[in-house]
Structures are given as structure tokens and as C-alpha cells.
Image (cartoon, rainbow, N blue to C red):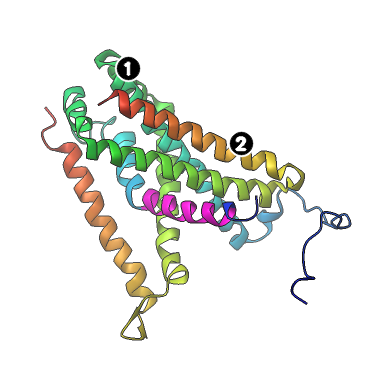
């Protein structure tokens, strides 16, 4: 049986009912799903901003000063506030999903979801404090 | 898009998502708001150059840029698929998304080598 079950490229045309593009506005859970998926756009935005910063750093003090000045423009501040909101949404949804994605057992007993998710938040605070410390110490 | 490629991209997606979840909020808060608005003193050009001189910093920055870009590529690919239902453009979308992430990673590697 199993060696007969295989895909062929000659399947009939898919029957797919088209949904309106804004199908996800009908339900709050769908809106949350789409917003969660869209966090990736802001993740990419910040990764590219970091790359832009590194390029300016490589080009010299003048280019870096221009980069720093550019980040003070209201448009960038506004985009960064929105991006921070989406990135935090990504962090929270990601951490809260870990117990679902990963079942941790200690001596055969499942570790409660609260502890699996909570440990992420503890590590997050420690990592963030370390990064902030490294970037703000000896700034002169 | 079958075989081993898609399962591997799901793995990269989750590693990149974890890196972004832990590191992006603090970096975005500092670089995007706290430093430009003067809430905290921003590191000087010389201080950042010295920091980036260290190979561990450069490896950190490469991982911090590259893997979240692949996280975006994989997630955005499915966002376009689910929300806009562009089924017939599936292969093109996948190539453009992963290609953009690859390009960004190559740019990061090149820039970080120049900073050494």
C-alpha cells in the first residue's frame, strides 16, 4: 500500500474558494494572528537598521554622525515606537508559545507551562540588562 | 520547496525568532528611542569602533542580523500566502524572501569584515 501512495504532478486543478483579502478582520483572534505574523516585518526593519548603522560605522566618523542625526528625525522616532510595539508583541507571543512548542520534563514530570514561559522572561531581563550595561558604560 | 529545505527553514525560523525575541527589544529601545531622545548617553563613535573590533562582538552582530532576517523571510512568506492568498506565486515569493535574507546576511558579513 505505502509504495503506491505517492504524489504525481498530474493532479486535477485545486478547488480553492477565494476569500476576501481582509478575511481576518472578522474575528479578534484572526486580527491577533495577522498582527503577530506582521511582527516579522518590524524584525526585518530593525535588522536592516542595524546593518545600516554598521555600514555608517565602517565608513567613518562623519558618516556615523549623519546616521545618528537621521535617527533623531521625527519620522524615524515614530517608526521606531511602532516597531518597538511590534517587536515586544513578538517577544511576548514567542515566549508564551514555548511551553506549547517544547515540553520540558524533570524526572518524568512535566514542568508547568508557567515555569517554562516564565524562565524566558527571567533570561530576557538579564540579557537586556547586560546589553544595556555594555552599551552605556564607558560611553565617553 | 519540499524535501529537506522547508523543515530546515522552520528550524532557522525558530532560532532567528528566539534571537529577535531576546535581543531586539533592548537594542531597539536603546538605539531607536533612548539614545536619539537623550534619555541615556549614547556610546561615542570611538567607543563603538573599539567594541566592534572584538571578534565576539562581530560574531554576535552577524548572528543578530542574519538569523532574524531568515526568520522574517520564512514568516513573511507564509503571511503573503495566508493573507493575500497568492498561491500561484508561491515559488517566486519564496525565492524573493529567502534571497533578500541571504543578501542582507552577505551585506552584514561584508560590512563586519571591513570593521575588523
- Residues A93 and A81: in front is A93
Quarter location, residue B95: top right
Magenta stretch containing residue B16, yes or no? yes
Relative height, residue A22 to residue B46 (above, below) = below
User: Which percent across, then down, holds residue B92?
Assistant: 68, 38
- Most extreme residue toward the bottom, as rendered? A108
Relative height, residue B80 to residue A11 (above, below) = above
Can residue A72 be spotted in the picture? Answer: no
Which residue is tagged 2? B96
Tags 1 and 2 on a common chain: no
Which SS type dominates the magenta stretch? helix
- Most extreme residue toward the front, as rendered? A3
Q: Give the label on residue A66, or none.
A: 1
User: Which percent across, then down, holds residue B103?
Assistant: 50, 31
- What residue appears at the point 45 percent right and 65 percent down from the top-left corner? A97
Can residue A134 be spotted in the picture? Answer: yes
- Residues A3 and B47: in front is A3
- What residue appears at the point 74 percent right and 74 percent down from the top-left corner? A2
Distance (Cα) linking label 1 and label 2 = 31 Å
- Residues A129 and A5: in front is A5
Q: How packed is label 1: few (under 14 Cα within 10 Å), some, or many (20 or more)?
A: few
Do the residues bearing badges 1 and 2 touch, measured as CB atoms within 8 Å?
A: no
Magenta-tinted stretch: B6-21
For disc 2, the chain is: B
User: Which percent across, then down, holds residue B87?
Assistant: 74, 48
- Secondary structure under tag 1 reads helix
Quarter location, residue B115: top left
Amino acid at each position: 500500500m505505502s509504495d503506491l501512495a505517492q504524489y504525481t504532478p498530474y493532479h486535477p486543478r485545486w478547488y480553492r474558494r477565494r476569500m476576501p483579502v481582509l478575511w481576518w478582520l472578522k474575528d479578534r483572534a484572526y486580527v491577533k494572528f495577522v498582527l503577530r505574523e506582521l511582527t516579522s516585518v518590524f524584525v526585518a526593519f530593525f535588522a536592516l537598521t542595524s546593518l545600516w548603522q554598521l555600514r555608517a560605522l565602517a565608513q567613518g566618523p562623519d558618516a556615523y554622525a549623519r546616521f545618528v542625526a537621521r535617527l533623531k528625525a521625527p519620522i524615524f522616532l515614530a517608526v521606531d515606537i511602532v516597531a518597538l510595539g511590534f517587536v515586544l508583541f513578538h517577544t511576548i507571543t514567542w515566549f508564551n508559545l514555548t511551553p506549547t512548542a517544547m515540553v520540558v520534563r524533570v524526572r518524568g514530570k512535566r514542568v508547568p507551562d508557567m515555569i517554562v514561559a516564565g524562565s524566558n522572561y527571567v533570561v530576557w531581563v538579564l540579557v537586556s540588562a547586560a546589553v544595556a550595561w555594555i552599551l552605556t558604560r564607558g560611553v565617553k | 520547496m519540499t524535501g529537506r529545505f522547508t523543515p530546515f527553514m522552520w528550524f532557522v525560523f525558530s532560532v532567528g525568532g528566539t534571537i529577535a525575541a531576546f535581543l531586539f527589544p533592548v537594542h531597539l529601545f536603546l538605539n531607536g528611542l533612548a539614545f536619539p531622545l537623550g534619555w541615556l548617553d549614547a556610546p561615542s563613535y570611538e567607543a563603538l569602533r573599539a567594541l566592534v573590533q572584538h571578534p565576539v562582538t562581530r560574531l554576535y552582530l552577524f548572528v543578530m542580523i542574519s538569523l532574524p532576517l531568515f526568520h522574517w523571510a520564512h514568516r513573511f512568506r507564509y503571511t503573503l500566502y495566508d493573507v493575500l492568498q497568492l498561491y500561484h506565486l508561491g515559488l517566486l515569493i519564496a525565492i524573493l524572501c529567502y534571497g533578500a535574507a541571504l543578501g542582507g546576511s552577505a551585506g552584514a558579513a561584508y560590512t563586519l569584515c571591513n570593521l575588523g
